Image (tube, rainbow, N blue to C red):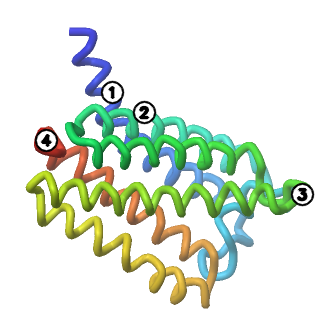
Amino acid sequence: MFKEIVIRLFRYSGILAIVAFVSSVIISVSFNPWFSIFDNAFSELGGSKASMPYIFNYGLIIFGFFMLLFSIYAIYISSNKIGTVSGSFMVIASFYFMMIGVFPYDFNPMWVHVFVALSSFLIGYLSIIVCGVGLIVGGKKIMGLILLLISLFSPFAVGFFSLYSAALVESYGIFVLTIWILLLTFFIKKAFNTQ
């Protein structure tokens, strides 16, 4: 009984992660009317220019924590090495997401924030690409192809959106994570066939 409750909590923690991120952005934007998704980076909501930056920064830490729980769930439902590697990469990405809140936008030195922000998304993309391969190998070809396509399309999306703003680039990253979370939460009981 207790084990089932814990598994269910971990299973839905990905949804809680997305809710935490979106909520922190919406609340932060309501206190910072200068913010524009077309001109700024989400991280600016956690910088010294922002009013109540702790809302966004704590939101990212909570987001990363729930992503960590969901990553453990992703490892749990996998039954081959590819799935385990994918979930393990996302565990690492989750810590980097939390670190974005710890080292906010204008942290000195600035490279620390840039490093953790880039690492979180790059490792997250790598995790989703590996998951896509694992799903294909495990017989879930359509879901695997969906994840592979949206992940492999990322450099083009990032290149296009970066012409406008970092927030649009980050939004695409969150979109990819959301698709991964929804597929593993609602469409896959056992993600990979035993090998």
User: Residue at the top extreme?
Assistant: 1
- Nearer-N-terminus badge (4/2): 2
Badge 2 crowding class, 10 Å Cα cut-off, few under 14, some 14 to 19, many 20 or more, is many
Q: Which residue occupies 33% across, 27% down?
A: 9
Mark 4 or mark 3: name the one nearer the start of the chain: 3
Give the labeled residue for mark 4: 195
What is the C-alpha distance between the residues marked 1 and 3? 37 Å
- For the residues labelled 3 and 2, say whether their Cβ atoms are less than 8 Å apart: no
Left or right: residue 27 versus residue 187 is right
Look at mark 2 in the image and give the residue it sits on.
69
Q: Residue furthest front?
A: 195
Location of residue 47 in the rendering, given as x and y in whole percent from the top left corner: 80, 57
Q: Residue at x 38, y 64 (%)?
A: 176
Camera-side residue of 32 and 103: 103
Q: Are the two marked residues, 1 and 3, in contact with CB atoms closer than 8 angstroms?
A: no
Can you tell which mark lies on residue 109?
A: 3
Q: Are marks 4 and 3 in contact (CB under 8 Å)?
A: no
Pinpoint residue 136: horizontal percent, then vertical percent. Answer: 16, 60
Q: Which mark is residue 78?
A: none
